[in-house]
Amino acid sequence: MAEAIAGLHSIRTILPVYAGPIHMENDCSSLIKELLGEGSSKSAISGIVRDIRSLLENLLDYNFSRIHRSRNEVAHHLARLCHSNVTEGVMLGLAPPCVVSLIEHDCNVYSAI
């Protein structure tokens, strides 16, 4: 459920300032299956999935993919950061210092594939 809520919050945040393609990666296979229309429409996250799909339906290009947990380190570090802070916030255009090296590594490794 937390992964779906985080995805919805992220999309709601980015849409007012970005109109380009969106690629949502997640290590939660049930969430990705539902977003792709392959999962149960009666699950606990089905309402959140409907909201996500509704927000994205006006975009020209969006997709979803499941990634291995080991490739989702940035998200897990950000989740830990959010759990340690009392307030929530949005950072556009920069990354917290705790994930900068991970992002640089991901960009170098996965752009070469």
Image (cartoon, rainbow, N blue to C red):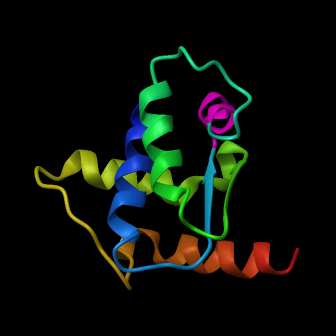
Horizontal side of residue 86 vs 90, given as left or right:
left
How many numbered markers are drawn? Answer: 0
* Residue at left offset 40%, top offset 69%: 15
Residue 81 spot, x, y in % from top left: 30, 55
Nearest the viewer among 16 and 113 is: 16
Q: Residue furthest front?
A: 58
* Principal secondary structure, stretch drawn in magenta: helix
Q: Write the start and end of the magenta stretch as one range.
A: 27-34
Q: Residue furthest bottom?
A: 93
In this view, 69 is above or below 87: above
Horizontal side of residue 95 vs 26, given as left or right:
left
In this view, 71 is above or below 90: above
* Residue at left offset 38%, top offset 85%: 93
Nearest the viewer among 30 and 63 is: 63
Residue 32 spot, x, y in % from top left: 65, 39
The answer to which image quadrant residue 77 occupies is bottom left
* Residue at left offset 67%, top offset 72%: 106
Q: Residue furthest top?
A: 42
Which quadrant does the C terminus fall into?
Answer: bottom right
* Residue at left offset 17%, top offset 53%: 85
The answer to which image quadrant residue 33 occupies is top right
Residue 22 spot, x, y in % from top left: 59, 67
Which quadrant does the N terminus fall into?
Answer: top left
In this view, 72 is above or below 30: below
Q: Is residue 46 magenta?
A: no
Residue 28 spot, x, y in % from top left: 61, 35
Horizontal side of residue 99 vs 68, given as left or right:
left
Nearest the viewer among 5 and 52 is: 52
